[in-house]
Image (tube, rainbow, N blue to C red):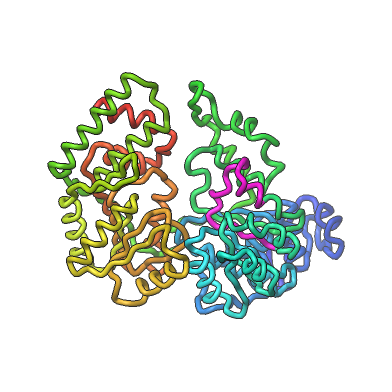
């Protein structure tokens, strides 16, 4: 393929009539050559004909607005998106997917192909990631966050004239009728794994607002990270003809039944998943950014005498119960959770009370890591009361620290993230992983400390990407603190990208046996 004077594409094809019959103004200029106007509509048609390497005219028509110069991979991603009404972007965390989407959408607006965009994303990044990035990449466009305690306020925003409306996943159900009436031309779904299950209200709500001519782009750096079946919900939105009508049929395609309750991936499941999750584009950080390396290190921190004593008491109680009752996933998870809580210094009793334990060894190790850090530090802790213990101890030691958890409002999170990135203080953010695992850039830090492990591979990977992304100028390190057998096993599973939720019974049995 050759670009002629930035106006036309010269294609060498076996069957020119295949192109001239669908693009009437295309001209045969040789036995196997066709000259096609280099326009957006023509490029889209050529892509639909599965002609490779067709560039979008965004390369010649667009000035790449905003305060940043796009990386080459961002231009390629934006080009790809403008050519597909339905598409996936699977580029890794930290590769600048948001910027590519904003540039592509802005170009389509300039071409009057679309008028309004609905962005669906986690509550935690509506302002701190999407609205901030819109200001950085397309300040000339208007945006609004459709999140409020008042349904009327949300409706007012949807009925307004903002070109980009940002909404959290479950908030869509509140305003779905107004979304339908306002004819959003493009729906962008960030961290699209939230829509992997078609039986959920969340998935059904999204499907209900998508019309045949709606553009839909779904973004995630970790597609089908937990299981091949996770691809089904995503494919049903973007590529519905590529998967069976019913989930059970797709599951039979990619999984085989091991026992009554256990399924395992078939050898060709990865190929099937790849094929159904199309059209798609993906860049890894190694392919597209000159980022510093990230290293992982584990620090063994012994449980205190008190922790060890009660760890064994709880474990022996589990052994006793296991001898007298059937072990289910629910009670296995609950008992393992108690061991994890104890390892981190605070256990929630059956009545909901918090029982504190001496976690001084781990607190001391954390402080040592922070003292050694040349830059700022993120501390991820899985339990809310543990977060409070950590923060109180750090502040008492003279370390400036802020908390990010589910109870911190989106506005306050944005303020904390901004101060963390731009000011000397706070030096440390103590974070509940689910509250800041997606979308947020925290490159002022180059050290992540896991105070204890979590069960989700996806959240673990996403949380680590908060520092290892565009804008990072320093080598990054992930430090994992571990002291109990259950933590060591869980970190190993996370390292090997094993879905802990599906292996909880096996993990429980190993802990009972003392393996």
Vertical placement of residue 94 versus 327, above or below: below
Please name the residue shown 63% across and 45% down the image. Answer: 235
Of 371 and 320, nearer the camera is 320
Q: Is residue 201 magenta?
A: yes
The reply to whether residue 10 is visible in this rendering is no
Q: Position of residue 200 (x, y in %)?
A: 60, 43
- Seen at 31% across and 24% down, the residue is 321
Question: Height in image: 226 above or below 479?
Answer: above
The correct choice, above or below, for 234 with respect to 142 in the image is: above
From the viewer's side, name the closer residue of 295 and 490: 490
Q: Residue at x 34, y 63 (%)?
A: 403
Q: Residue furthest left?
A: 305
Q: Is residue 511 left or right of residue 37?
A: left
Instruction: Tell whether 178 sits left or right of 367.
Output: right
Of all residues shown, which one is farthest toward the front?
A: 351
**Would you identify the image quadrant in which residue 175 lies?**
bottom right
Percent from the top left, x then y, of residue 475?
Answer: 30, 63
Q: Position of residue 344 (x, y in %)?
A: 25, 48
Which residue is rendered at x = 66% and y = 57% of the image?
A: 216
Q: Quadrant of the C terminus?
A: top left
Figure quadrant of residue 44: bottom right
What residue span does the magenta drawing correspond to? 186-206
**Can you give x and y, in whole percent of width and height, for residue 22 in the image?**
84, 56
Quadrant showing the N terminus: bottom right
């Amino acid at each position: 393929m050759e670009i002629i004077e930035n106006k036309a594409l010269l294609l060498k094809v076996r069957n020119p009539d295949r192109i001239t019959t669908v693009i009437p103004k295309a001209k045969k200029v040789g036995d196997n050559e066709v000259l096609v106007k280099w326009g957006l509509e023509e490029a889209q048609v050529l892509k639909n004909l599965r002609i490779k390497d067709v560039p979008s005219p965004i390369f010649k028509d667009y000035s790449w607005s905003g305060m940043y110069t796009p990386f080459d991979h961002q231009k390629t991603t934006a080009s790809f998106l403008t050519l597909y009404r339905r598409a996936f972007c699977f580029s890794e965390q930290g590769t600048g997917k948001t910027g590519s989407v904003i540039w592509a959408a802005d170009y389509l607006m300039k071409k009057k192909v679309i008028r309004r965009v609905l962005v669906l994303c986690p509550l935690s990044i509506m302002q701190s990631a999407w609205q901030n990035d819109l200001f950085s990449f397309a300040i000339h466009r208007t945006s609004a966050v459709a999140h409020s305690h008042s349904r009327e306020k949300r409706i007012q925003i949807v009925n307004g004239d903002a070109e980009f409306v940002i909404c959290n996943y479950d908030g869509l159900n509140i305003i779905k009728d107004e979304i339908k009436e306002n004819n959003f031309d493009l729906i962008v779904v960030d961290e699209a794994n939230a829509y992997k299950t078609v039986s959920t209200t969340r998935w059904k709500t999204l499907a209900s607002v998508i019309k045949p001519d709606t553009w839909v782009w779904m973004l995630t750096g970790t597609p089908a990270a937990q299981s091949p079946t996770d691809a089904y919900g995503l494919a049903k939105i973007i590529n519905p003809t590529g998967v069976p009508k019913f989930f059970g049929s797709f599951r039979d395609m990619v999984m085989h039944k091991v026992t009554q309750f256990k399924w395992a991936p078939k050898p060709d499941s990865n190929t099937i998943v790849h094929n159904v999750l199309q059209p798609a584009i993906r860049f890894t950080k190694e392919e597209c950014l000159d980022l510093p390396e990230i290293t992982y290190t584990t620090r063994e921190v012994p449980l205190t005498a008190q922790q060890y004593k009660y760890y064994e008491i709880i474990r022996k109680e589990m052994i006793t119960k296991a001898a007298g009752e059937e072990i289910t996933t629910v009670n296995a998870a609950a008992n393992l959770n108690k061991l994890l809580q104890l390892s981190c210094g605070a256990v929630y009793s059956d009545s909901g009370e918090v029982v504190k334990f001496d976690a001084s060894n781990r607190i001391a190790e954390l402080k040592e890591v922070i003292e050694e850090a040349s830059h700022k530090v993120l501390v991820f802790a899985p339990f809310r009361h543990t977060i409070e213990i950590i923060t109180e101890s750090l502040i008492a030691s003279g370390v400036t620290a802020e908390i990010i958890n589910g109870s911190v409002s989106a506005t306050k999170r944005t303020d904390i993230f901004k101060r963390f990135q731009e000011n000397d203080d706070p030096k440390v953010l103590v974070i509940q992983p689910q509250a800041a695992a997606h979308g947020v850039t925290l490159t002022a830090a180059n050290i992540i400390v896991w105070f204890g492990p979590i069960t989700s591979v996806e959240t673990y990977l996403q949380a680590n990407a908060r520092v290892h992304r565009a804008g990072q100028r320093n080598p990054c390190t992930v430090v994992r603190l571990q002291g109990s057998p259950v933590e060591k096993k869980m970190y190993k599973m996370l390292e090997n990208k094993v879905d802990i939720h599906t292996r909880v019974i096996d993990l429980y049995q190993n802990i009972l046996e003392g393996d």
